[in-house]
Image (cartoon, rainbow, N blue to C red):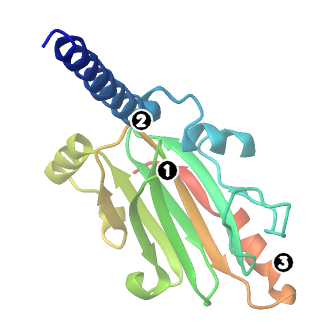
Amino acid sequence: MRRTMPMRRTVFFVLGGLLLGGIIHIATVVMVPYFATDDASTLMRQFGRADVFHVLPPAEAGAEPLANLDPKMLYAVCRFSLNDGPVRITASLPEDFWSVAIFDRRGRNVFSVNDRSAERSALDLAVLTPVQMAQLRQDPPAALETAIVVELPLDSAFALIRVFVADASLLPGAKANLETADCSGTL
């Protein structure tokens, strides 16, 4: 009987250690995104200052500016903050496929629209926080009648515009369109 008591105690300590190790492992995995210093917004800083669209170099195998970019698309990215007020994103885009997506700091897509769902070739998008939207409803500016208004509970984000380039001869025109894109406009 005396031999079974130390055996039980050993099994108890091993199971307790495994349980504690599992809890620590799960807590560490869950907390890593909160303590990571290089989030998606930080990664976008490499392309230039905020409130300006930066056209990314064309994606080529082994030399992609960001991971998983489609080589048939041309991209432009703009970081912005909603702390100073709403942001208006405008661009005159080609008739071929285009899309714009808004991402939070961690790189999660929180809004997207393309040329087919917007039913237009010109992009006019206003991004606001819920508080800014409540203030805007009291006295809406006439300039927003044709804009797509998006309410997002974010302090800062980035926009990514994608333009389909079917042929290399269309690349200069698509690049010129993206270079005229603006994300500094306020309402």
Residue located at (81% from left, 80% from top): 171
Circle 1: residue type: Gly
* Residue placed under numbered mark 2 in the picture: 29
Q: 139 or 71: nearer the eye? A: 71
> Could you tell me residue 68's position as x and y percent?
66, 66
Q: Earlier in the sequence, mark 3 or mark 2?
A: 2
Q: 29 or 113: nearer the eye? A: 29
> Could you tell me residue 123's position as x and y percent?
50, 72
Q: Earlier in the sequence, mark 2 or mark 1?
A: 2
**In the image, 75: left or right of 81?**
right
| Residue 65 in view (yes/no) | yes
**Are the residues tagged 2 and 1 within 8 Å (C-beta)?**
no
Circle 3: residue type: Pro
**Are the residues tagged 3 and 2 within 8 Å (C-beta)?**
no
* Residue placed under numbered mark 1 in the picture: 107
Up the image or down, 72 lies above or below 153; here it is below
Residue located at (39% from left, 31% from top): 25
**Considering the numbered disc 2 on the image, is that residue within a helix, a strand or a loop?**
helix
* Residue placed under numbered mark 3 in the picture: 172
